[in-house]
Image (spheres, rainbow, N blue to C red):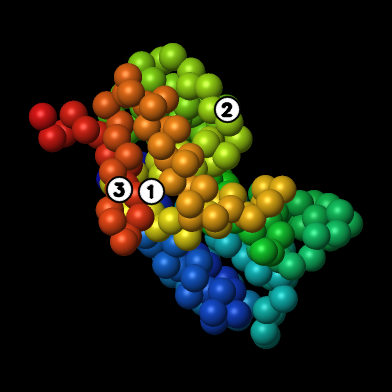
Amino acid sequence: MNALGIDAMRLLLVEDNDQLAHWLAKILRDDGFMLDHVSDGEAADAAVRTMPYDVVLLDLNLPHLSGKSVLRRMRERGDATPVLILTATGAVDEKVVCLGAGADDYIVKPFDARELVARVKVLARRQSPSRSNRLKCGNLSYDMDRCQFAVEGEPLTLTPREHAVLEALILRAKKTVAKTMLADSLSNADAPTSEDAIEIYVSRLRKKLEKSTATIITLRGLGYLLEDGADDE
Protein backbone atom coordinates (compact mmCIF):
# COMPACT_ATOMS: atom_id res chain seq x y z
CA MET A 1 0.00 0.00 0.00
CA ASN A 2 1.19 3.56 -0.66
CA ALA A 3 1.24 6.52 1.72
CA LEU A 4 -2.46 7.13 1.15
CA GLY A 5 -3.45 3.64 2.16
CA ILE A 6 -4.46 2.73 -1.40
CA ASP A 7 -3.17 -0.35 -3.17
CA ALA A 8 -0.69 0.52 -5.93
CA MET A 9 -2.44 1.13 -9.22
CA ARG A 10 -0.89 0.46 -12.62
CA LEU A 11 -1.50 3.15 -15.21
CA LEU A 12 -0.75 3.41 -18.91
CA LEU A 13 0.10 6.92 -20.09
CA VAL A 14 -0.25 7.39 -23.84
CA GLU A 15 1.25 10.79 -24.72
CA ASP A 16 3.58 11.80 -27.56
CA ASN A 17 4.69 15.12 -26.06
CA ASP A 18 7.87 14.08 -24.26
CA GLN A 19 8.00 17.11 -21.96
CA LEU A 20 4.38 16.72 -20.87
CA ALA A 21 4.78 12.96 -20.49
CA HIS A 22 7.84 13.41 -18.27
CA TRP A 23 5.95 15.89 -16.04
CA LEU A 24 2.89 13.65 -15.78
CA ALA A 25 4.96 10.55 -15.10
CA LYS A 26 6.79 12.27 -12.22
CA ILE A 27 3.54 13.51 -10.65
CA LEU A 28 1.83 10.13 -10.90
CA ARG A 29 4.79 8.10 -9.69
CA ASP A 30 5.33 10.50 -6.80
CA ASP A 31 1.74 9.76 -5.79
CA GLY A 32 2.48 6.05 -5.62
CA PHE A 33 1.19 4.88 -9.00
CA MET A 34 3.02 2.33 -11.11
CA LEU A 35 3.17 3.77 -14.61
CA ASP A 36 4.08 2.67 -18.12
CA HIS A 37 4.46 5.24 -20.89
CA VAL A 38 4.14 4.85 -24.65
CA SER A 39 4.16 7.62 -27.23
CA ASP A 40 2.15 6.29 -30.18
CA GLY A 41 -1.18 4.59 -30.82
CA GLU A 42 0.15 1.29 -32.09
CA ALA A 43 2.34 0.87 -29.00
CA ALA A 44 -0.66 1.73 -26.82
CA ASP A 45 -2.82 -0.88 -28.53
CA ALA A 46 -0.11 -3.50 -28.03
CA ALA A 47 0.35 -2.52 -24.37
CA VAL A 48 -3.32 -2.83 -23.40
CA ARG A 49 -3.47 -6.23 -25.12
CA THR A 50 -0.64 -7.64 -23.03
CA MET A 51 -0.85 -5.89 -19.63
CA PRO A 52 -3.82 -5.29 -17.31
CA TYR A 53 -4.12 -1.63 -16.26
CA ASP A 54 -6.29 0.12 -13.70
CA VAL A 55 -6.61 3.24 -15.87
CA VAL A 56 -5.42 4.32 -19.33
CA LEU A 57 -4.60 8.02 -19.80
CA LEU A 58 -5.01 8.52 -23.52
CA ASP A 59 -4.07 11.47 -25.72
CA LEU A 60 -6.12 11.81 -28.90
CA ASN A 61 -3.58 13.11 -31.43
CA LEU A 62 -1.03 10.32 -31.64
CA PRO A 63 1.37 9.03 -34.31
CA HIS A 64 0.53 5.82 -36.23
CA LEU A 65 -2.91 5.30 -34.64
CA SER A 66 -5.22 7.93 -33.17
CA GLY A 67 -6.38 7.86 -29.58
CA LYS A 68 -9.95 7.38 -30.77
CA SER A 69 -8.89 4.31 -32.72
CA VAL A 70 -7.08 2.89 -29.69
CA LEU A 71 -10.23 3.41 -27.62
CA ARG A 72 -12.46 1.88 -30.29
CA ARG A 73 -10.29 -1.23 -30.56
CA MET A 74 -10.31 -1.66 -26.78
CA ARG A 75 -14.08 -1.52 -26.55
CA GLU A 76 -14.62 -3.72 -29.62
CA ARG A 77 -12.70 -6.56 -28.00
CA GLY A 78 -14.52 -6.10 -24.69
CA ASP A 79 -11.73 -4.36 -22.78
CA ALA A 80 -13.53 -2.33 -20.09
CA THR A 81 -10.41 -0.70 -18.61
CA PRO A 82 -11.30 2.89 -17.58
CA VAL A 83 -9.99 5.43 -20.11
CA LEU A 84 -9.31 9.08 -19.26
CA ILE A 85 -8.93 11.19 -22.40
CA LEU A 86 -6.20 13.88 -22.34
CA THR A 87 -6.68 16.48 -25.04
CA ALA A 88 -6.18 20.12 -25.93
CA THR A 89 -9.65 20.20 -27.52
CA GLY A 90 -12.34 21.46 -25.20
CA ALA A 91 -15.20 21.41 -27.72
CA VAL A 92 -18.40 19.83 -26.41
CA ASP A 93 -18.91 17.89 -29.65
CA GLU A 94 -15.50 16.27 -29.29
CA LYS A 95 -16.27 15.32 -25.69
CA VAL A 96 -19.60 13.78 -26.67
CA VAL A 97 -17.91 11.73 -29.41
CA CYS A 98 -15.24 10.41 -27.05
CA LEU A 99 -17.69 9.55 -24.28
CA GLY A 100 -19.96 7.91 -26.83
CA ALA A 101 -17.03 5.82 -28.06
CA GLY A 102 -16.49 4.46 -24.56
CA ALA A 103 -14.25 6.94 -22.75
CA ASP A 104 -14.93 7.18 -19.01
CA ASP A 105 -13.71 10.72 -18.43
CA TYR A 106 -12.22 13.65 -20.30
CA ILE A 107 -9.79 16.37 -19.17
CA VAL A 108 -8.64 19.34 -21.23
CA LYS A 109 -5.03 20.52 -21.36
CA PRO A 110 -3.70 22.44 -19.55
CA PHE A 111 -5.07 20.86 -16.39
CA ASP A 112 -4.31 20.95 -12.69
CA ALA A 113 -2.16 18.05 -11.45
CA ARG A 114 -4.27 17.45 -8.34
CA GLU A 115 -7.44 17.25 -10.42
CA LEU A 116 -5.85 14.66 -12.69
CA VAL A 117 -4.73 12.54 -9.72
CA ALA A 118 -8.19 12.73 -8.14
CA ARG A 119 -9.91 11.74 -11.40
CA VAL A 120 -7.57 8.80 -11.91
CA LYS A 121 -8.34 7.53 -8.41
CA VAL A 122 -12.08 7.86 -8.97
CA LEU A 123 -11.86 5.81 -12.17
CA ALA A 124 -9.69 3.17 -10.50
CA ARG A 125 -12.19 2.83 -7.64
CA ARG A 126 -14.99 2.25 -10.14
CA GLN A 127 -12.92 -0.55 -11.63
CA SER A 128 -12.17 -1.97 -8.16
CA PRO A 129 -14.99 -0.97 -5.77
CA SER A 130 -13.04 -2.31 -2.80
CA ARG A 131 -10.68 0.67 -3.01
CA SER A 132 -11.37 3.34 -0.42
CA ASN A 133 -12.86 6.66 -1.45
CA ARG A 134 -11.64 8.23 1.77
CA LEU A 135 -8.12 9.45 2.40
CA LYS A 136 -6.86 9.67 5.99
CA CYS A 137 -3.99 11.28 7.81
CA GLY A 138 -4.35 10.60 11.51
CA ASN A 139 -7.90 11.55 12.49
CA LEU A 140 -8.21 13.90 9.51
CA SER A 141 -10.24 12.35 6.71
CA TYR A 142 -11.07 13.49 3.19
CA ASP A 143 -14.11 12.12 1.37
CA MET A 144 -13.05 12.39 -2.27
CA ASP A 145 -16.57 11.88 -3.60
CA ARG A 146 -18.08 14.66 -1.48
CA CYS A 147 -14.93 16.82 -1.38
CA GLN A 148 -15.38 17.10 2.39
CA PHE A 149 -12.72 17.21 5.10
CA ALA A 150 -13.54 16.10 8.65
CA VAL A 151 -11.77 15.64 11.98
CA GLU A 152 -13.15 12.73 14.01
CA GLY A 153 -16.24 12.87 11.82
CA GLU A 154 -16.80 16.61 12.38
CA PRO A 155 -16.77 18.53 9.06
CA LEU A 156 -14.10 21.21 8.67
CA THR A 157 -15.23 24.61 7.45
CA LEU A 158 -12.69 25.81 4.89
CA THR A 159 -12.52 28.57 2.33
CA PRO A 160 -12.08 27.40 -1.30
CA ARG A 161 -8.36 28.25 -1.23
CA GLU A 162 -7.78 26.61 2.15
CA HIS A 163 -9.58 23.52 0.81
CA ALA A 164 -7.39 23.48 -2.31
CA VAL A 165 -4.18 23.70 -0.28
CA LEU A 166 -5.23 20.99 2.18
CA GLU A 167 -6.41 18.76 -0.66
CA ALA A 168 -3.04 19.09 -2.38
CA LEU A 169 -1.32 18.13 0.89
CA ILE A 170 -3.50 15.11 1.72
CA LEU A 171 -3.28 13.80 -1.85
CA ARG A 172 0.47 13.61 -1.21
CA ALA A 173 0.35 12.79 2.51
CA LYS A 174 3.76 12.09 4.06
CA LYS A 175 5.46 13.59 1.00
CA THR A 176 7.02 17.01 0.59
CA VAL A 177 4.88 19.45 -1.41
CA ALA A 178 6.71 22.51 -2.72
CA LYS A 179 5.23 25.99 -2.30
CA THR A 180 5.26 26.36 -6.06
CA MET A 181 3.13 23.23 -6.42
CA LEU A 182 0.64 24.57 -3.88
CA ALA A 183 0.54 27.87 -5.75
CA ASP A 184 -0.08 25.97 -8.99
CA SER A 185 -2.98 24.13 -7.34
CA LEU A 186 -4.69 27.53 -7.05
CA SER A 187 -3.81 28.66 -10.57
CA ASN A 188 -7.44 28.49 -11.72
CA ALA A 189 -8.51 31.01 -9.10
CA ASP A 190 -9.42 34.59 -9.97
CA ALA A 191 -5.92 35.91 -9.29
CA PRO A 192 -2.34 34.57 -9.23
CA THR A 193 -1.25 33.09 -5.91
CA SER A 194 2.07 34.11 -4.40
CA GLU A 195 4.22 31.91 -2.18
CA ASP A 196 3.65 34.43 0.63
CA ALA A 197 -0.09 33.85 0.30
CA ILE A 198 0.49 30.10 0.63
CA GLU A 199 2.12 30.75 4.03
CA ILE A 200 -1.03 32.58 5.12
CA TYR A 201 -3.31 29.71 4.03
CA VAL A 202 -1.09 27.17 5.78
CA SER A 203 -1.16 29.24 8.97
CA ARG A 204 -4.97 29.35 8.86
CA LEU A 205 -5.15 25.62 8.23
CA ARG A 206 -2.92 24.89 11.22
CA LYS A 207 -5.38 26.74 13.46
CA LYS A 208 -8.31 24.81 11.98
CA LEU A 209 -6.44 21.53 12.49
CA GLU A 210 -5.66 22.17 16.17
CA LYS A 211 -8.01 19.34 17.20
CA SER A 212 -6.57 16.98 14.63
CA THR A 213 -3.55 14.73 14.95
CA ALA A 214 -2.72 15.69 11.35
CA THR A 215 0.06 18.27 11.30
CA ILE A 216 1.42 20.49 8.55
CA ILE A 217 5.22 20.50 8.84
CA THR A 218 7.33 23.26 7.30
CA LEU A 219 10.45 21.98 5.57
CA ARG A 220 12.45 25.15 5.17
CA GLY A 221 13.52 25.70 1.59
CA LEU A 222 11.56 22.67 0.40
CA GLY A 223 7.87 23.15 1.16
CA TYR A 224 5.32 21.47 3.42
CA LEU A 225 4.47 17.97 4.55
CA LEU A 226 1.21 16.65 6.02
CA GLU A 227 1.75 13.88 8.53
CA ASP A 228 0.10 12.25 11.54
CA GLY A 229 1.63 13.91 14.59
CA ALA A 230 0.49 10.97 16.72
CA ASP A 231 3.13 8.84 15.01
CA ASP A 232 5.79 10.83 16.85
CA GLU A 233 4.31 10.20 20.28
Crowd tier of the residue under label 3, counting other residues whose Cα lies within 10 Å: few below 14, some 14–19, many 20 or above: some
Q: Say whether residue 87 is left or right of residue 83.
A: right
User: Dot 2 lies on which element?
Assistant: loop
Q: Is there a contact, CB below 8 Å, between mark 1 and mark 3?
A: no
Q: Say whether residue 85 is left or right of residue 32.
A: right
Q: Where residue 172 is drawn, which disc sits there?
A: 1
The image shows residue 180, relative to residue 228, as above or below, that is: below
Question: Percent position (x, y) of residue 167?
Answer: 48, 40
Marker count (numbered): 3
Which of the pair 107/213 is nearer the observer? 213
- N-terminal label among 1 and 3: 1
Question: What residue would you read off at disc 3?
Answer: 218
The image shows residue 203, relative to residue 121, as above or below, that is: above
**Three-letter amino acid code at the position of disc 3:** Thr
Question: What residue would you read off at disc 2?
Answer: 146
- The quadrant where residue 138 appears: top left
Question: Percent position (x, y) of residue 109?
Answer: 69, 64
- N-terminal label among 2 and 1: 2
Which of the pair 209/146 is nearer the observer? 209
Q: Where residue 65 is drawn, which disc sits there?
A: none
The CA distance from mark 1 to mark 3 is 15 Å
Mark nearer the viewer, 2 or 1: 1
Crowd tier of the residue under label 1, counting other residues whose Cα lies within 10 Å: few below 14, some 14–19, many 20 or above: many
The CA distance from mark 2 to mark 1 is 19 Å
**Three-letter amino acid code at the position of disc 1:** Arg
Residue lying at the far right of the rendered structure: 93
User: Dot 3 lies on which element?
Assistant: strand
Question: Percent position (x, y) of residue 188?
Answer: 67, 52
**Quadrant in which the N terminus appears:** top left
